[in-house]
Image: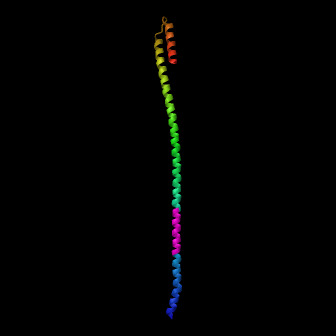
Amino acid sequence: MSNYISLALNLIFGSGFIISLITLRSQQKKAGSEAKGAEATAESTELDNVEKAIKIWREMAENLKAELTVSNEKYDAVAKKVEGLRKDVQKLNYTNQKILKLLDKISHDNLETTVAEIKEEIKKSDV
């Protein structure tokens, strides 16, 4: 009879233990799946953040490229103007050198002819 009592007690307490193990196992699975879900969400959020960062950098690169194009166009225009001014200065320097040579030749005897040559030289440089 004590065997039966022992068997009954084992079934009562043993089944509680089995239920505890089953409950523990299901809670463990639930916690594992929640952890995986949180990890997937974190990875998804990280990928979203990376995509947003890529988009921001791409927009910045495109803006910088557009600004560089505009700057290059402005630089080309300024370079052309500088070249034109350089040529003008070169012409004026040449004319000034000629005028200085003519001024060195001035004397009382050739004053009128030298002044006429200088005026002619100035007219040539204006053209």
Residue at 52 percent across and 37 percent down: it is 70
What secondary structure do most residues of the magenta stretch adopt?
Answer: helix
Does 39 appear above or below 23?
Answer: above
Query: Residue 31 lies in magenta, yes or no?
Result: yes
- Boundaries of the magenta span: 25-40
Query: How is colour applied across the structure in the image?
Result: rainbow
Identity of the residue drawn at 51% across and 48% down: 58
Q: Is residue 35 magenta?
A: yes
Looking at the image, residue 49 lies above or below residue 11? above
Camera-side residue of 105 and 35: 35
Residue 9's place in the image compared with 33, above or below, is below
Please tell me whether residue 84 is drawn above or below residue 25 in the rendered image.
above
Q: Position of residue 57 (x, y in %)?
A: 51, 48
Residue found at the very far bottom of the displayed protein: 1
Q: Residue furthest top?
A: 109
State the image coordinates of residue 122 (x, y, percent, origin top left).
Answer: 51, 15
Q: Position of residue 65 (x, y in %)?
A: 50, 42
Mark count:
0
Q: Look at 53% across and 62% down and name the residue there.
A: 41
Q: Residue at x 52, y 53 (%)?
A: 51
Q: Where does the image place residue 86, in percent across and percent down from the top left?
A: 48, 25
